[in-house]
Amino acid sequence: MNLAWLLIRIDSRRPASWLAMFGAAAAAWLLAAGPAGPAAIIAAWSVGACLAVAAIGGPLPPPCGTLVAPLVWLSYRLAWPALGAVACMVAATILPGGEPAGAAGNAATLAILVGMAAASNAVEAARKRGANAADAASLALLLAASAAMLAWIGARNRKDDVLAVLGLVVGAWGTLAAAVLWIDRQRDQSMTATSSDVTSRGDMVSGPLRRWLYRGGMAAALGGMIGWLFLNPQDAVLDVWLSVGCFVALAVPAALLADIHHAPAWHRLLRSMATKIESGWVRRLAWGTDPAYAVPSTWMHAAVLGWPPLVAALLSAGAPERAAMALGVTAAVVATALLLRLLETAVSRTLGGGETLLAVALVLAIAAGLVGMGIESALTPSGAAGRAVGSGERFSLSAPPT
């Protein structure tokens, strides 16, 4: 009991815990207020995965980490966003005349909780296999985002069957997770750093799993380019969601939750390095105060995810409308990278540790995603986005449903 109270006191002093709790409550309320369609369920799943990663953050300090089982520690940290989502559902149910009450609120809350459980399992499995905190968080977010995108495509043939859509998301996530485990068993050394692997500071910051995450992000970007920018340009808006979602999953943990941020001695040493990059606010914004670390964490991810739509724009020079859509995807990735650099550069000195910055970035990503979903729903001629997807209609920002 004393250990449990100690963990509660530790987490209560983390701004990330409170951000995850209030973010879960606000997201559950907003999602429950709308129609309980496939779009709401898929969005709630993604929200749950982001909140789980934000609440978990980095590993416990060594004195506490040796006293607590990993599952117990994960349970305490996940309790914060779970409590926020459940409290929102209960409040919406008992309040008189509350719009979010009913099946929509229950379905959205259930999807958020399932997304949290899936992301936490991915984080714990990756850490057990030697991945650092940033790579484990990126893997969890990438698996959740990939499952959401696959379920989004498959949900077009279903009409307001929220449990079937949630089952489709979980099934897609399970298939992807099984594929990752199979690859890990085939290549055991890809997720475990050895002394011979650490040859530079970049290897200390980015674990071996990062190479596979790069390949997964590049494969997703190429698939989106071929599928939505060339073969089906009416759904080019989906490539925006795919590219920006992959960037958030890959770059945000790498930029804000790298192991080097949990080692104050390394952090002070890198900040005291004499380098020409530190002069001038433009260069500090572009490359950061840790030049050996900020370049691969932000702009390299932006380059990996931004070049396929840029190539598509060049190849579509004869079709101005299609080229503009492809350039819009690249612009969205670059704008997200600039926002991440602004957050890391301007807020790091005031908010402190990387866990807080990670929670702030993911909560902002959730808010932007919900606002974007609302705007897309408002611009869809058929009405709600969930109804358009659920009824099998093709919907996008560039063309009316057919």
Image (spheres, helix red, strand yellow):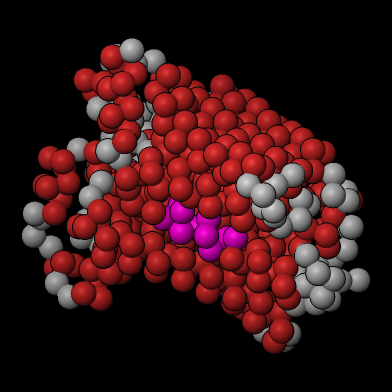
Q: How many marks?
A: 0
Q: Taken as a whole, is the magenta stretch helix, strand or loop?
A: helix
Question: Closer to the camera, 332 or 28?
Answer: 28
Q: In terms of image quadrants, where is residue 261?
A: top left
Question: Closer to the camera, 287 or 235?
Answer: 235
Question: Closer to the camera, 24 or 364?
Answer: 24
In the depicted structure, whether residue 3 falls above or below residue 132 = above
In the depicted structure, whether residue 379 falls above or below residue 231 = below
* Residue 136, horizontal then vertical, whole percent: 45, 35
Relative to residue 312, is residue 37 drawn left or right? right
Q: Is residue 369 magenta?
A: yes
Q: Is residue 97 magenta?
A: no
* Residue 83, horizontal then vertical, whole percent: 50, 35
Relative to residue 61, is residue 182 drawn left or right? right
Q: In terms of image quadrants, where is residue 144?
A: top right
The N terminus - image quarter? top left
* Residue 267, horizontal then vertical, whole percent: 17, 46
* Residue 275, horizontal then vertical, whole percent: 12, 63
Give the residue at x 69% y 70%: 376
In this rendering, does residue 144 appear at all? no
The C terminus - image quarter? bottom right
Give the residue at x 28% y 30%: 10
Give the residue at x 20% y 57%: 349
Relative to residue 269, is residue 136 drawn left or right? right
- Please give the range of residues in magenta: 361-370
In this rendering, does residue 248 appear at all? yes
Give the residue at x 31% y 24%: 7
